[in-house]
Amino acid sequence: MDVKDVKIKGIPYAEFKHNDYLEDYVKELQANGVNVVVSKLDELINWGRSNSMWPLIFATSCCGIEFMATAAAHHDIARFGMEVVRNSPRQSDVMIVAGTIVHKMAPLLKRVYDQMAEPKYVLAMGGCAISGGPFVDSYHVVEGVEKIVPVDVYVPGCPPRPESLFYGLMQLQRKVKLEQFFFNKER
Amino acid sequence: MSGNYFSGLFKGVKSLLVGMGETWKELWTKKVTAEYPENRKTTLFVSDRWRATLTMPHDENNEHACTSCKVCETNCPNGTIQVIQKVIETEEGKKKKVLDRYLYDLGMCTFCNLCVLTCPSDAIVFSKDFENATFTRDRLKEQLNKEGSKLREKKKEVKPEAEKSAPEAE
Amino acid sequence: MNYSQPLELSHVTAWLDEVLRGAMPEFWALLIEYVLIGVVLLTLYAVLALILIYAERKITAFFQSRLGPNRVGKWGIVQSVADMVKILIKEIIYVKKVDKVLFYVAPFFMIVASMLTFGAIPFGQGLQVVDFNIGVFYVLAVSSLGIIGVLLAGWSSNNKYSMVGAMRSGAQFVSYELSAGLALMTMVVLSGTMQLSEIVESQRYCWNLFNGHISAVIAFVIYLISGHAETNRGPFDLPEAESELIAGYHTEYSGLQFGFFYLAEYLNMFIIAAIATTVFLGGWMPIQVKGWDTFNQIMWYIPSYLWFFAKAAVLVFISLWVRWSFPRLRIDQLLNLEWKYLLPINLVNIFVMVLLVLSGLTLTGLFPNVFGN
Amino acid sequence: MAEQIIFYILAAVIATFSIMAVSTKRIIRSATFLLFVLLSVAGLYLILGYQYLMAVQIAVYAGGIMVLFIFAILLTHKPGESAPSKPIAKRLLIALLSVGGLAFCTHIIVHNVSKVYSYSLGTTGSDIKYIGLTMMGTDKYQYLLAFEAISMLILACIIGGIMVARKRK
């Protein structure tokens, strides 16, 4: 599988940012040597996974409101098949961390992440989740959620506009579409 | 008592029917959804006041207007901007501090516009390009001045300030 | 009157039966037929669930003036297939402190209960798997098994939210089962039989909904309300009230096990619509008018299963319409509605129906040469 | 043939789950196993052609009584609780008693087996209409009196329940 094969409706490959990360990722995969049949099956699975990302909203502040705008009629996250917001972490696929994570909240974030079923992805939305944002110098703020859970996609903004979040979700879809399900040694 | 029961029942049924009528009307209204990735070249509307990422405009000679005065860096409440200077020697043999690297952490910025407002030479503006999601945190830390760019000469600055961004207009 | 029915599926089944019986002894032919029926039913079950999930998401979107899924295939038509693919290979989490046996058994209860009901629904002329002479009663009895799955799921998850969700669901189901049953019994009084195929046959020229006029309409509305409540949807979804209970009784379930609950929920919605169609709206019987032979013939060209699914789809749509119109009830309002309104009205209604039938004031009784069989 | 196979399967299921229902230490599991037993009995009725009885069995026992049992257990027990195990002497006593009971029942059945067969003649009993008429009839072998007596009992139960549950001033 080539990175160029990963198509997202509406945006051509060249106009995506940070393509080099995916290219490196694919090179790493191809070093293992992927069987053709298996990779077709992988494509089916990845198609399913990337088009049915059920989010779990870990919203602690204003970015959560922006997510609501994303889910509402004007932007409509349902177009991506992602409107099934599961409130139980066991049933969700992508955790959208939207908001400041303080040290008291951090263990809970970690616990919710641990409760999610594989495959699970994390999307850090907004400055606070990415780096601590304006509160970064406070004694009580976690400087970016990647210190607690592995983050797949960072969506900068304060808060990001709904289209920004869509763009981030499409980046995540691209990443998911390159994954390997069978014979993955890391699993 | 029994009168209440029945009038309540009928009132309830009536109000439920009114509610269902409203949703029925809603079913046939025009759908308001803006389809983002499909419309990004056509009808996508981003307000001029939207601030998505900090940029440093360069002209065709690869020159920018930043004098590396560090006002933006001191004014930034988050410590998002880092201006790194270097010392060069001008033709007259004087030593002068110019901009070496202008570092900007997009993941930390709250887009408060203080840097743009206070910049004495209008070297930086906020752009509307909101598609900035990346896979790694490092990618969000950008260098705004391009490779090999240098400070614009004084005479060019006499031009009317057409490039001023909209938020400053009061 | 024999009308030609070129597209009827019963031709295929009859031909298959003939071929099988000709080729092998009866025992093996029957065995093969049973297996075939099972496979077909399971497939229909899965396909219907996929269609329902897609339809629900689209219609929901339209009610909220959105577009709904539209990026996978044309109009997002394979969206639920993507969901299925994902949920099939999603990890099933082995929670440590659950009651293992019951935790794994509970989703199957839901599925089996709705499957058993599914088997008794007449999908078309000759397309009914089991046709008991107590069909309506059987459907009521079997569908009441599902609640045990919910209760066991809530208990065995060892989670307080699941537990509260299961208790609410149990209270809701037990109370609304009562008025659903009574509403169906009203119609049994009208049609004089419990056999689903006979109920359908008896509605050849006049649907039960019109035949019993006032009383039947009240029973129809009550059945729709209580059926809607039984499926834990719409304004009655407080077992899964996410602001209070996360996801209710299936909070701890993940992957395919959760998929079972999800599937059963949608199928129950369809089953309620299907039974209402059969009992009130004439089932698979095409619209017919006595004496208008050409008209009847044209109606018969449309195969019976299409009639059935079209009628059921209308009811499913009404269910969604209600769901997106009203806010969620509180538990006391919910029980008030059942015990103070639906049940007394139902009891009076059944009595009125008995009077109607005895005094011959039904439409078939009043105008036998227009509506009578 | 097929019916016999299904009968033996059901019988095995009934026997196994009955034993499991009394031997398990968790009360909720015991209730579930009892439910399986009741459902298998409903299956037996289906084999015999008593469809009405099957539906009643499922609706009343599985759908009604078991739900009540499970509700009661849910309200009174904590998840994960097990009953304490009984001392060995008591367990032996129980085993002896149950074996004795089994022997007694077997004796009666075997002794009266011819009579049992003579009863199960005719299929009119499975007709709903027949059952309904018998239930409401006043002739010999009809049950109106018993029916009404039971409904009085249930009415008394309901009134008693309301008395217990009413608000005290």
Image (cartoon, rainbow, N blue to C red):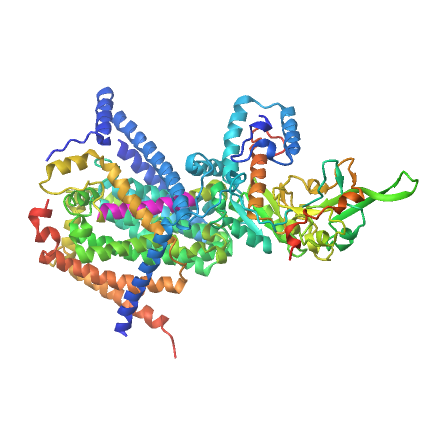
Of the 4 image quadrants, the one containing the N terminus of chain C is top left
With C172 as the anchor, is C134 left or right in this view?
Answer: left
Q: Which residues are magenta?
A: C261-279
Residue located 88% across and 44% down the image: B96
Observer-nearest of D9 and B54 = B54
Residue D140 versus residue C84 in the image, above or below: below
- Side of A187 relative to C135 (left or right): right
Q: Quadrant of the C terminus of chain C?
A: top left
x then y, percent, for residue A142: 69, 52
A17 left or right, relative to C213: right
* Image quadrant where residue B58 sits: top right
Say which of A15 and C260 sits in front. A15
Q: Is residue D48 visible?
A: yes
SS majority, magenta: helix
Magenta stretch containing residue C43, yes or no? Answer: no
Snapshot quadrant of residue C176: bottom left
Residue shown at 62% from the left, 40% from the top: A152
- Asked whether the viewer can see residue C128, the reply is no
**Which residue reaches farthest left?**
C369
Q: Tell me: D86 left or right of C186.
A: right
Rendering coords of residue C304 (x, y %): 22, 37
In the rendered image, residue C168, in percent from the top left (x then y), is placed at 41, 58
Name, please, the residue furthest toward the right.
Answer: B93
* In magenta stretch: residue C263: yes
Q: Given the current orientation, which residue lies at the most extreme top position?
A: C23
Q: Is residue A59 above or below residue C305?
A: below
How many discs appear?
Answer: 0
B126, C200: nearer the viewer: B126
Rendering coords of residue D18 (x, y %) = 38, 47
